[in-house]
Image (cartoon, grey):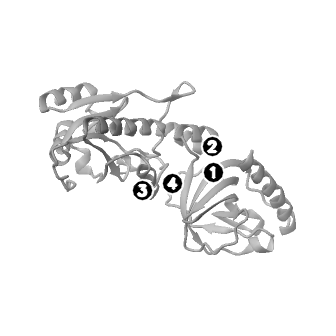
Amino acid sequence: MTAPSALPNDGRGTVVTVGTFDGVHLGHRQVLEEIARRARRAERRSLLVTFEPHPMEVINPPAAPALLTLAQERREFLAQCELDIVVFMRFTRELSQYPPEAFVQLLLERFHMQELVIGHDHGFGRGRTGNVELLRLLGGQLGFAVDVVDQVGIGGRPVSSTLVRRAVAGGDLETAARLLGRPYSLTATVVAGARRGRGLGYRTVNLALPDARKLLPPDGVYAVRVEWDGGAAGAMMHQGPRPTFGETARTLEAHLFGVDLDLYGKELKVSWAARLRDVTRFASPEALKRQLDKDFAAARAALTG
């Protein structure tokens, strides 16, 4: 493994946490808020060491989970946290074989760690053998403090990336939003489309499909919120094939309310708000137009209700 560059040692040291942090959900945020609070109190720097790609993509690719946040999305959400430093460490097979003792030594030497804060279910090093007891033993030997952040629970269940994935995959957007502390979202680039929307009275923007590792909710028609550099709008979005036109490939196509701009090539952040209906084959474009009128009203109501 090529170790990340060492931080300059300014004598303050760091308060560190380590993990994948896919989704940056409420449980993750509690850990990040804790290291930021501790760092401010002790006049140290808060530091997150996180991994790319997801460790399971290296250790056991067939078992790797769909991602809640692709790399760019995760960076965006982490940038909103009060962290001094984020280190994106490339996860390799070599790194997966590091015993806890070796990885702790890396944190001490490269990042001047004075405190290590972990989540309640954290496993550290090869085979997740670095549990709380071992880390506290190492802390006593090597001179760093170890503390554990209690789990965040909602509805009697601990918040986890697995639970968020289950909600998104099942189309339970409300539960996903509660676990994340924000609506589930996707960042994608506007690309050229078939321009059928204009003829139906609903000009649309077509979005490039994300990396296949990104988890999407079930196909359907949704009320969404869309943001881009310099603007934002409510929208209704068709996600899935276009059976009325004989097209089986999945597409992402959104009609933005009150927006008549050329957004080709721009990156849009789409946040799912409510599911309106399944993808349906209509007998004619006219029948589709009548349904789009209903979808428009339903989406407006969902976004303002």
Q: Which residue is mark 4?
A: 214
Residue farthest left in this picture = 141
Tell me: 72 left or right of 300: left
Circle 1/circle 3 CB separation < 8 Å: no
* Mark 4 neighbour density, 10 Å: few (under 14) some (14–19) many (20 or more): some
Q: Earlier in the sequence, mark 1 or mark 3?
A: 3
Residue 62 seen in the current view: yes
Residue 173: give its label. 2
Residue type pointed to by label 4: Lys
Residue type pointed to by label 2: Leu
Is disc 2 placed on a helix, strand or loop? helix
Is disc 3 placed on a helix, strand or loop? helix
Tell me: 191 left or right of 196: left
Give the distance between the C-alpha atoms of the residues marked 3 and 2, in whole angstroms.
22 Å
Depth check: give the residue in front, 64 or 3. Answer: 3
Residue type pointed to by label 1: Trp
**In the picture, which quadrant includes the N terminus?**
bottom left
The quarter holding residue 268 reads bottom right
Residue type pointed to by label 3: Ala
Who's the residue at 43% across and 46% down the image? 22
Residue 71: give its label. 3
Residue 272: give its label. 1
Q: Earlier in the sequence, mark 4 or mark 3?
A: 3
How many marks can you see? 4
**Horizontal and vertical percent position of residue 123:** 31, 34
Circle 2/circle 1 CB separation < 8 Å: yes
Front: mark 4 or 1: 1
**Horizontal and vertical percent position of residue 8:** 17, 53
Circle 4/circle 1 CB separation < 8 Å: no
